[in-house]
Image (cartoon, coloured by chain):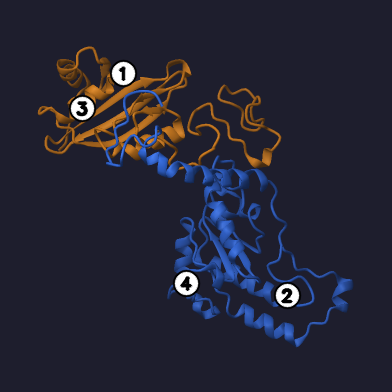
Chain colours: A orange, B blue
Amino acid sequence: MTTVWSGSALAEAIEAFAPDSVESSGGSDVWLKPESISTVCEGLKNRSEFRFDMLSSLTAVDYIDHFEVVYHLTSLPMNSSAVLKSRVGLGRSEASIASVVPIWRGADYQEREVWDLMGIRFDGHPNHKRIMLWEGFPGHPLRKDYVTYDQSIASVAPGSAGNPEIGNADGNA
Amino acid sequence: MTGPKLIDPYGTPAGADPRGALQSITLDLDRTEGAAVNRMKSTHLEPFPDPVLEVPDELRRSVIVSSVDYLLNWARKSSVFPLQSGLACCSFEMISAAMARFDLARFGMEALRASPRQADLLIVAGTLTWKMAVPLRRLYDQMAEPRWVISMGVCATSGGPYYQSYSVVPGVNHIMPVDVYVPGCPPRPDALLYGIMQLHDKIRRYSLSGQAAGQE
């Protein structure tokens, strides 16, 4: 059975090799400061006590006032797993975080998907562009404040008050 | 792009392009594709009218249904070659309809063509996204007339569960005129066969002197 790192134990272990990088911890999650993600991930992959050689999943959540990037890590040699999170784009500002493609190559398409649908920029990504939607698509559709501009309601132009049939993220029509 | 220096784990030569080595190869292609998609999305705002074959009564008396028409239409309806083009889950029902249990070969349709030049019928089987609409319209344009289109499933017909989605075409009739709509999610092979037989009925009623089949 795969051992799941508890948040507090993992936070302590991370602080041991990368001081001042953990924001908080709880349950099975560790919240990292976004600027320390590269250092911490490199340590988690290479250090003998972790050996997280696989990034199972990289995704993002929109919490209205900020975004959260979530990393699910698995260690095949140690048979353990861990969850890292990082808050970016506080106050809905331009969200960006360092790419982990140099560490886990499997992050490539997942980071592009997060950029495509959620609009979080991954600095240092070798091929930073949309993956599923086409170039020139307006906006990032999985954001909570995204409003679809359906063709059947052609009178609503992008940038106007909102779609009268759907309403915007605040619930105003 | 700001941030740390670009590291390319794929080993493509770095430094050639400030956007990164991979992007210098692919981004221009992506831009061309994206421009085509945006052009199609902004121009195909209204659905094409369905090609209706009903002949008004006063015309019906003056139209002579010749034996040439009859023979030609019989030949056409007995050898409708569908284009092999599955978009989503509906295509599995289409494949099933072509296989031994339901057996499209009974209607002279067993040859699913791999080339649009050899096909008479385009079965739009599945969700049509705006990104796919451009190549699908190109396939339709490459088919020789007379040509017919079946919209299979609710996704192709109206967008279905993805109606008002940011990426799905609200009905394939925005992209090309549709002859027969087959409802279902996905339609069973029998439903598709019924739709095909409705199309056969439609082909049978074409007239040389009237509107040519498959014209817009």
Q: What subunit carries mark 1?
A: A
Which element is circle 4 on? helix
Whether residue A31 can be seen here: yes
The N terminus of chain B lies in quadrant: top left
Evaluate if marks 1 and 3 touch, with contact meaning CB atoms under 8 Å apart: no
Q: What subunit carries mark 3?
A: A
Q: In front: mark 1 or mark 4?
A: 1
Asked where in the image residue A104 lies, by quadrant, the reply is top left
Query: In the rendered image, which residue does mark 1 sit on?
Result: A35
Residue closest to the far right: B58
Residue A113 point in image, percent of width and height: 40, 37
Q: Which amino acid does label 1 sit on?
A: Glu
Query: In the rendered image, which residue does mark 3 sit on?
Result: A42
Q: What subunit carries mark 4?
A: B
Q: Which amino acid does label 4 sit on?
A: Ala
Q: In front: mark 3 or mark 4?
A: 3
Residue closest to the far left: A48
Residue closest to the far top: A20
What is the CA distance from the residue labelled 3 to the residue labelled 2? 70 Å
Q: What residue type is labelled 2?
A: Tyr
Residue B160 point in image, percent of width and height: 57, 49
Which element is circle 1 on? helix
